Amino acid sequence: MPEQQRRLDTVAAETIRALNQTEAKAGTALLKEIAKGQPEVAAMLADAGPLRDFLVAALSLSPYLRDTAGITPQLVTTAICEPLDDSIEQLIRTARDCWRPKDGRTPGEAEVMTCLRNAKRSLSFLVALADLARLFTARDTTRALSLMADAAVAAAIDHLLLAAHESGKTKLKEPDAPSAGSGLIVIGMGKLGGFELN
């Protein structure tokens, strides 16, 4: 992690431009809709600075970003208010720990899958914005994506091992750390091993 936290609100003016006027209007309309429930987004829109122009352009250029913002409006607030590095690290931790029992109950497969999908989508959204804003280098971007993939694979393995232990199909040495000493090995080679997933 860099010493100084990178923040989207430091984006330079005209870093990217909207695809066209029609798409820019669609991006602005979405941000106005999000602003109804997110006061920080409303304040950003009222400011009319480089951050607003950047977000309108980003949403105009990427249907994925536009759809994600519409599905999870809170992500826009996170993107504009929180340090990007901290938010991304938290999402990776959330993914890695999603298999862990909570309140004495082990999450089911559907819960783990939902958590992993949400964490991946959120991380992809933040990383894409950081990349488009030129706050992240290509190496930063691929490293974050690789760390999320690693966390998701590890969480899935721990979930499956713990489920097998709880059903009596296997006996784990440490149920609190299912993969430790399990004998199961997953090797991430190539782009994952080199932190270069894209």
Image (cartoon, rainbow, N blue to C red):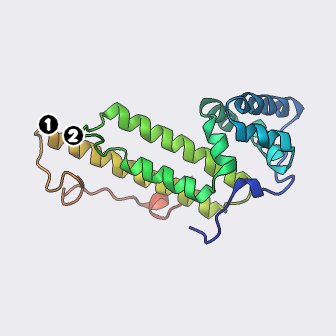
Q: In front here: 3 or 173?
A: 3
Can you give x and y, in whole percent of width and height, for residue 50 in the image? Answer: 84, 50
Image quarter hosting the N terminus: bottom right
Q: Secondary structure at mark 1?
A: loop
Can you give x and y, in whole percent of width and height, for residue 190 in the image? Answer: 46, 61
Q: Secondary structure at mark 2?
A: helix
Q: Could you tell me how far apart the alpha carbons at marks 1 and 2 are, in whole angstroms?
A: 6 Å
In this view of the protein, can residue 197 be seen by the observer? no
31 vs 128, left or right, is: right
Q: Hey, what amino acid is under mark 2?
A: Ala
Can you give x and y, in whole percent of width and height, for residue 128 in the image? Answer: 65, 49
Residue 10 falls in image quadrant: bottom right
Q: In front here: 68 or 10?
A: 10
Judging by the rendered image, the residue that carries numbered circle 1 is 167
Give the vertical position of 10 relative to 19 (above or below): below
Q: Residue at x 65, y 35 (%)?
A: 69
Give the vertical position of 36 relative to 196 (above or below): above
How crowded is the residue under tag 1: few (<14 C-alpha within 10 Å), some, or many (20+)?
few
Q: In front here: 161 or 193?
A: 161
Q: Residue at x 44, y 53 (%)?
A: 93
177 vs 111, left or right, is: left
Judging by the rendered image, the residue that carries numbered circle 2 is 163
Check whether the beta carbons of the residues at disc 1 and disc 2 lie within 8 A of each other.
yes
- Seen as rendered, the residue at the extreme right is 21
Residue 45 falls in image quadrant: top right
In this view of the protein, can residue 45 be seen by the observer? yes
Q: Hey, what amino acid is under mark 1?
A: Ser
